[in-house]
Amino acid sequence: MAAKIRIPTPLRKLTNNEELIEVNAATVGDAITELQTRFPGIKERLLDETGAVRRFVNVYVNEEDIRFLQNQQTPIKAGDEVSIIPAIAGG
């Protein structure tokens, strides 16, 4: 069984409208690389020019923010769920 990545609605146009993508990756960074290989253009929406996760993008592994774990080095394993959640601003 692979890890699953939950794709937010605004990015589904890049994943052929798939909401859940299965990946075989050891870390969040590897998962993003695999997504880019399968769905070109998605990486630039998630990472900035330095390779860091963009400020307005939140990434969670099993509901824990990777910024408080090991960021892109956060390990993932079969059965884990990675959620990509764009930040929402407004007032």
Image: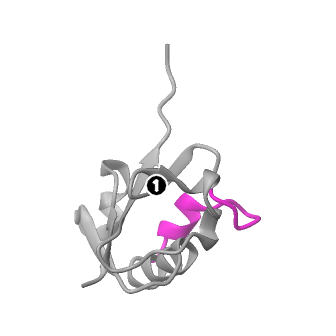
- Residue 44 is a magenta residue: yes
* Residue 1 position (above or below residue 16): below
Magenta part, dominant SS: loop
Depth check, front residue: 42 or 63? 63
Q: Is residue 79 magenta?
A: no
Residue occupying image coordinates x 50% and y 38%: 87
Label 1 sits on a secondary structure element that is strand
x and y percent of residue 37 in the render?
A: 46, 85
Q: Residue at x 69, y 62 (%)?
A: 52
Start and end of the magenta stretch? Answer: 40-53
Residue type, label 1: Tyr
How many numbered marks have been drawn onto this rendered protein structure?
Answer: 1
Measuring from the top left, give residue 82's x and y in whole percent.
39, 63
In the picture, measured across the screen, residue 6 lies left or right of residue 58, that is left
Where, quadrant-wise, is the N terminus in this rendering?
bottom left
Quadrant in the rendering for residue 51: bottom right
Task: Report the residue marked by disc 1.
Answer: 60
